[in-house]
Image (spheres, rainbow, N blue to C red):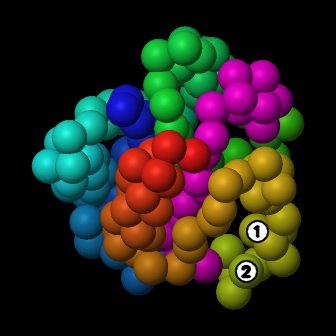
Amino acid sequence: ATLLALHGPNLNLLGTREPGIYGATTLAEIDAGLARRAEAAGHRLESFQSNAEHALVDRVQAARGAVDFILINPAAFTHTSVALRDALAAVSIPFIEIHLSNPHAREPFRHASYFSDLAVGVVCGFGADSYRFALDAALKRLEAGA
Ligand code: DQA
């Protein structure tokens, strides 16, 4: 199967961005780890990061018919983007919502997500491991043929 990891705004700064909240692992390290793990399980994983809402919407649209499962950390767009939500709904590709931090333990404006009710599931609060746990859940689901 083909999986797509999508990363929203400011996640290109991982490693140096508020490390007390988001950890020391860089996005390149996260993506490489995901690709390695997916390949070891006989699958393929592509990654894309953008600070621009339209670029993420375009990437989701381009995934239609080409991607079987999406792992997405919408970052700040989690709390703002009807457009990105609508794109995921439009392509009907199952996805898991991921956060490094636990948004529910942070400022009230982070408690709401435009994605959670459409997601297969949500993994948050485990730092870079959130991505790994989400990938394992996605692979299990794909291998079950769901
Ligand atoms: C985040 C949480 C969001 O509230 C925040 O805007 C981010 C990162 C996380 O991974 O913890 O940029 O999605």
Q: Quadrant of residue 126?
A: bottom left
Say whether residue 91 is left or right of residue 108: left
Q: Determine if the magenta segment contains residue 92.
A: yes
- Residue located farthest toward the bottom when viewing the structure as drawn: 105
Cβ of mark 1 under 8 Å from ligand 1: the answer is yes
Quarter-of-image position of residue 46: top left
| Residue positioned 53% across, 19% down in the render | 63
What is the magenta range? 85-102
- What is the x, y in percent for residue 120? 67, 55
Disc nearer the start of the sequence (2/1):
2
Q: Which residue is mark 1?
A: 110
Labels in figure, total: 2
Q: Which type of secondary structure does the marked residue at label 1 adopt?
A: helix
| Above-or-below relation of 82 to 75 | above
Q: Are dots 2 and 1 in contact, CB under 8 Å?
A: yes
Q: Nearer the viewer, residue 66 or 126?
A: 66
Q: Amino acid at mark 2?
A: His
* Disc marking residue 104: 2
